[in-house]
Image (cartoon, grey):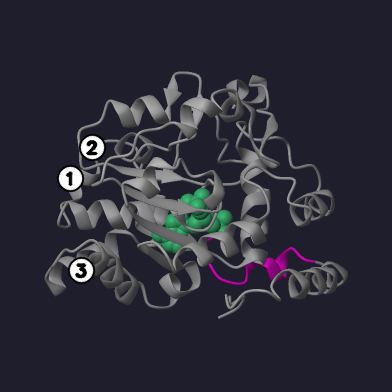
Amino acid sequence: ELEWALLPRGEISQVEGIFLEKNTCNIWDKIWNFQAKPDDLVIASYPKAGTTWTQEIVDLIQNNGDIEKSRQAPIPLRQPFLELVITTYSGINQANAMPSPRTLKTHLPVQLLPPSFWEKNCKIIYVARNAKDTMVSYYHFQRMNKTLPDPGSWDEYFETFLAGKVAWGSWYDHVKGWWRKKDSHPILYLFYEEMITDPKREIRKVMEFLGKDLTEEVLDKIVYNTSFDVMKNNPMTNYTNVRMNHNISPFMRKGVIGDWKNQFSETQNKQFNEDYEKNMADTSLLFRMEL
Ligand code: A3P
């Protein structure tokens, strides 16, 4: 805890008008020129959409439900986080050192994904979560995670998020951009809310997309082992590390739909809804914000 308190906060800067961690911006050429391989799988998302959950589901499907195999290393070592750079960790180096087939995580907006992934026609799984719950989750994440700037008060953060002045940019541009791309590229577009409602159905979708065929028994085992409570207690998925202070807010925080109702004021909700309507007028994308 003392160590956490002494760590400096990470900063954000910009690439092509998108806010990203400064460490990422500093090596942008290296990221942009990353060489993908045709059998790479990408898990893409806006932060706090359920990325880690999707990652663990994918890993267990790839390992045919073998729990021991999936628990050999923390998730960023099993599935490199492409654009992340912190002290000794570099997602790019991690990926380059890894044998194929590789699974890579990214939060990059669609226009910033290294072009090599399109050229090699890599499969991509995108996961999206409704904006209100994403915003609340992101706020608490920035409070506890020193790699990102201090979010300030909730009221301040509300404005920062709506203005898209957070790492990885505007939620709107992100979810809409990836949604459009799926018409011309193999992208499985998942929704956090659907995963909560019927995890087995969504896990089966992922399995089929990966061209795997698992028994009902194995699928049930994966449903269980990727449940919120199991992942919260699994040190390989719950992000226990020095940069995160889980006493401020645990990484595995609540894992529900509609927690925004405990955070948004009535005025904020009204302001949000007006902004949302404007920004979502040009897309067929629909989100559920409550159960
Ligand atoms: P909350 O902060 O709302 O609890 P990401 O992995 O993209 O950073 O997303 C983190 C969010 O997903 C957190 O949301 C976390 O609790 C939730 N999450 C992680 N694993 C989950 C699971 N197995 N089931 C439901 N939610 C999960």
Q: Amino acid at mark 2?
A: Gln
The residue located at (88%, 70%) in the rendering is: 267
Marks 2 and 1: CB-CB under 8 Å? yes
Q: Is residue 242 visible?
A: no
Q: Secondary structure at mark 3?
A: helix
In the foreground, 25 or 81: 25
Q: Is residue 29 above or below residue 51?
A: above
Q: Which residue is mark 1?
A: 68
How many residues crowd around disc 3 within 10 Å: few (fewer than 14), some, or many (20 or more)? Answer: many
Whether residue 260 appears in magenta in the rendering, the answer is yes
Is there any visible trace of residue 90 in the rendered image? yes
Q: In the rendered structure, which segment of residues is drawn in magenta?
A: 252-264
In the rendered image, residue 37, in percent from the top left (x then y), is placed at 27, 40
Q: Please state if 84 lies on the left or on the right of 96 as rendered.
A: right
Image coordinates for residue 161, horizontal then vertical, percent: 74, 53
Q: Are marks 2 and 3 in contact (CB under 8 Å)?
A: no
Which badge, 2 or 3, is on the more N-terminal residue?
2
Locate the N terminus and report the quarter of the image it occupies. top right
Q: Which mark is residue 219?
A: 3
Q: Which of 33 and 46 lies nearest the eye of the viewer?
A: 33
Label 2 environment density (alpha carbons within 10 Å; few <14, some 14–19, many ≥20) = few
Q: Secondary structure at mark 2?
A: loop
Tag on residue 72? 2
Report the front residue among 166 and 150.
Answer: 166
For residue 193, the mark is none
108 sits left or right of 240 in the view: right
